[in-house]
Amino acid sequence: MLLVSEDLDELLELSDRLVVMFHGQFVYGGARQRSRPDGNRPSYGGPLMMQDMTSLKPSARDEVFLRRSFEIARRSRAHGNHPFGAVLVDSAGKVLIESENGYMPAHDGTAHAERLLATEACRTLSKEVLANATLYSSAEPCAMCAGAIYWAGIGRVVYALSERRLRGVTGNHPENPTLDLPCREVFRSGQRPTEVVGPLLEDEAEALHESVWEK
Ligand SMILES: [Zn+2]
């Protein structure tokens, strides 16, 4: 199903399961934004297109939500934080939580986007919703984040940039000395299954880090 309108508010009232596309790029999907409690929506001129996520193939849906995590990562960078983003989506394709990186202002090295998301998810969602949800991340969850995802009971993870490739990008940067342990190893060590898909769209994901880790 495809709806076209120039009125963003009208479109957003139609359904939480719809995703707003603008010139083929994701722009909005009706989520709570953890780091934007004011609930401000971005405004865009021109016609908006909405796509029913239930009509997409799983792999196409994964790419849509990964690109959404890229948008969140760009927002994170614009807010003075590291360029990482995560989004939690339920089994029907509804966005539940978005999270940017939270390093600043307290220099909190544990405030990775996925860890913050997992904590909020665990506090606010039922076990059943968590087990059937997918966490999309612009980069592979590190050991800490994979642990948080496991302890929150989130059933599925899709990531873009691998930790190995991220390590090549960040090097031993003091703010991000990448911990290169495959998240699958962490999940394999647990006692409940966590499905993992990735890496995907790595070139796009790596571009988020351009000129960030040079100093
Ligand atoms: Zn992490």
Image (cartoon, rainbow, N blue to C red):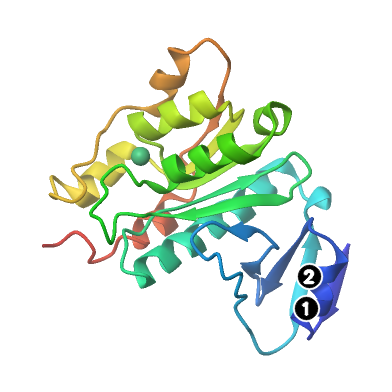
- The reply to whether the C-beta atoms of the residues labelled 2 and 1 are less than 8 Å apart is yes
Taking the spot 57% from the left edge, 59% from the top edge, the residue there is 68
From this viewpoint, is residue 160 visible? no
Whole-percent x, y for residue 156 in the image: 60, 31
Secondary structure at numbered mark 1: helix
Taking the spot 41% from the left edge, 39% from the top edge, the residue there is 140
Q: Which residue in the protein does label 1 denote?
A: 9
Whole-percent x, y for residue 207 in the image: 36, 62
Residue type (three-letter) at the residue carrying disc 1: Asp
Q: Which residue in the protein does label 2 denote?
A: 12
Image quarter where the N terminus lies is bottom right
Q: Is residue 169 left or right of residue 207?
A: left
How many marks can you see? 2
Residue type (three-letter) at the residue carrying disc 2: Leu
Disc on res. 208: none
Q: Is residue 15 above or below residue 55?
A: below
Could you say which is closer to the camera, residue 208 or residue 121?
121
